[in-house]
Image: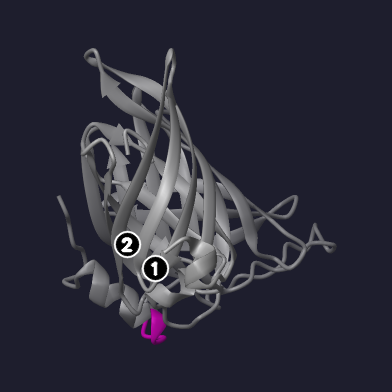
């Protein structure tokens, strides 16, 4: 729990756009059919489907972090919702793009955000699903991890049980961005959480309990609000993983940049969770 302007494109709110994706309604976008590269007969073709993407890096010396909820279509087009931090600024927007297979079991990805084009390359697993990707722009350092998602709606109860995480982020101290690291263990039940966070800020180590709540939309986008035992508040936008394995979150507080995967270990009863 690290130091624990919203823009809408295509005349749809991010929420309604993502829900449209979940229901299988996608905007038209002309792109070539995605097929396996003939030079790589051992590679599977890129697999259409729904994905969550967690990325972090730097842009011109400032920390950058991102969550994407993205749908790949059989015709090689894609669309999604982007949650992004650039330094102290948070943005949320929809986008479109395309993907195509290239050599060595890779995929080239092009996305258009707010009239700006970004490019990246992803490596595929044995089933043709993207696993990790790297931004391919001269002024951006961005590496991302991918999560395949089933096409089903989400609810807060998907997280019931024990969730753990480790994360590294940046917080604004002394007029500059400073690194931090955190490990957490938390218990969820019905959208309510209680947890423990151990945080390192270089020479300082803190331990705090916290509690909070999550509001989950059917499209699996979520909003988290928490408060710790030291009286500090934390705010996040999140993507709940529809297979019940956990969630991804991105901190929206201006002085803290953290993006993380929080892994659900198992369901638990109220007694086991310490409620």
Closer to us: 191 or 106: 191
Q: Which mark is residue 79?
A: 1
Closer to us: 189 or 18: 189
Tag 1, which secondary structure? Answer: strand
Taking the image as shown, residue 28 lies to the left or right of residue 234, namely right
Q: Quadrant of the C terminus?
A: bottom left
Residue visible at 37% across and 66% down?
Answer: 80
Q: Which residues are magenta?
A: 22-26
Magenta includes 244? no
State the residue position of label 2.
95
Residue visible at 23% across and 49% down?
Answer: 91
Residue visible at 29% across and 40% down?
Answer: 229
Count how many numbered circles sit on residues in the image: 2
Looking at the image, tell me whether mark 2 or mark 1 is earlier in sequence order: 1
Residue visible at 65% across and 67% down?
Answer: 46
Q: Quadrant of the N terminus?
A: top left
* Pointers 2 and 1 in contact (C-beta within 8 Å): yes
Give above or below for 165 relative to 28: above
């Amino acid at each position: 729990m690290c130091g624990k302007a919203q823009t809408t494109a295509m005349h749809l709110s991010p929420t309604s756009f993502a829900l449209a994706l979940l229901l299988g309604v996608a905007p038209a976008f002309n792109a070539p059919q995605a097929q396996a590269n003939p030079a790589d007969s051992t590679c599977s073709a890129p697999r259409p489907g729904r994905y969550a993407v967690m990325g972090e890096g730097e842009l011109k010396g400032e920390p950058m972090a991102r969550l994407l909820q993205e749908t790949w279509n059989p015709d090689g087009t894609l669309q999604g919702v982007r949650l992004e931090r650039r330094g102290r600024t948070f943005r949320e927007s929809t986008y479109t793009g395309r993907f195509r297979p290239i050599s060595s079991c890779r995929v080239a990805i092009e996305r258009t955000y707010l009239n700006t084009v970004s490019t990246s390359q992803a490596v595929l697993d044995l089933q043709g699903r993207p696993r990790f990707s790297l931004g391919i722009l001269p002024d951006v350092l961005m590496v991302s991890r991918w999560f395949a998602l089933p096409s089903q709606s989400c609810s807060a109860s998907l997280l019931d049980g024990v969730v753990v995480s480790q994360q590294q982020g940046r917080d604004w101290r002394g007029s500059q961005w400073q690194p931090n690291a955190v490990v957490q263990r938390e218990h969820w039940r019905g959208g309510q959480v209680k947890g423990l966070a151990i945080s390192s800020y270089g020479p300082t180590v803190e331990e705090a309990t916290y509690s909070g709540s999550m509001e989950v939309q059917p499209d699996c986008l979520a909003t988290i609000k928490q408060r710790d035992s030291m009286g500090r508040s934390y705010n996040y936008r999140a993507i709940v993983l529809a297979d019940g394995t956990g969630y991804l979150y991105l901190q929206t507080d201006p002085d803290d940049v953290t993006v993380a995967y929080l892994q659900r270990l198992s369901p638990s009863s109220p007694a086991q969770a310490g409620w």
